[in-house]
Image (cartoon, helix red, strand yellow):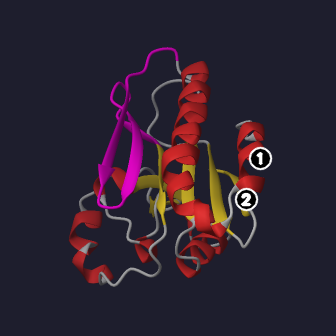
Amino acid sequence: MTDYAELNRILPRLSQARAAAALSNEVAPLLVDLWADDYRRRVASCELLETSVGQFSYLFDRTTERLVAAWGISQGKSTVPRKEIAPRMRGHPLANSGIYHRGHAIPHTLGGSTDINLVPQLGKINSGPFRALERLAVSHAGALYFTYWLYGPGDSQVPVGVEQGLLVPGATACTFKLATFAN
């Protein structure tokens, strides 16, 4: 599990009035550094690339061609109909389709797209406990939502786990919710 101790030192001073800029300019770069350092410890040879699609950002390993992390600020519920992304999802590779879903790193209901945003995710996690923080992110515009995907040895496209987080600005401080799931 990633050590989020430094993040816990920042959050108490992030009031709602200051949260928008701080989440984008201070917290997100800190998270990217934490994830990149942790991933580099786990993966001997990698080339990390940070990119954005719409309002969300992604940390991608070009060497293994897999998603490492995804994050962004919630704008509330997305109005894009699911039928508009369905054809792209059907074309996405899926490992062991009886067990895994084409899971969204950033949920469709939050505005997550396809392609780089899709990860092989256990169906029982994707359709179950993973949805709790997704729903909270949708209902809390201005919150920072993220997923950090954990991989085992080798270059498998299937993560062995995921850390899912949500930072919700409050009147005087941010609340940090973190869930970790085996995959």
Mark 1, secondary structure of its residue: helix
Q: Hey, what amino acid is under mark 2?
A: Phe
In the rendered image, which residue does mark 1 sit on? 8
User: Quick check: is 103 in the magenta stretch?
Assistant: no
Q: Nearer the viewer, residue 102 or 8?
A: 8
Q: Label 2 crowding class (10 Å Cα cut-off): few <14, some 14-19, many 20+?
A: some
| Boundaries of the magenta span | 44-68
CA gap, disc 1 and disc 2: 8 Å
Q: Which amino acid does label 1 sit on?
A: Asn
Does the rendering let one see residue 151? no
**Position of residue 114 in the picture relative to residue 134 (left or right):** left
Q: In this view, does 89 lie to the left or right of 11?
A: left
Q: Residue 176 carries which label?
A: 2
Q: Which of 140 and 21 is in front in this view?
A: 21
Q: Is the magenta stretch mostly helix, strand or loop?
A: strand
- Secondary element under disc 2, as helix, strand or loop, is strand
Picture quadrant where residue 152 is located: top right
Residue drawn where x is 78% and y is 39% of the image: 5
At horizontal 35% and vertical 61% (from top left) the residue drawn is 55
Q: Which of marks 1 and 2 is nearer the N terminus?
A: 1
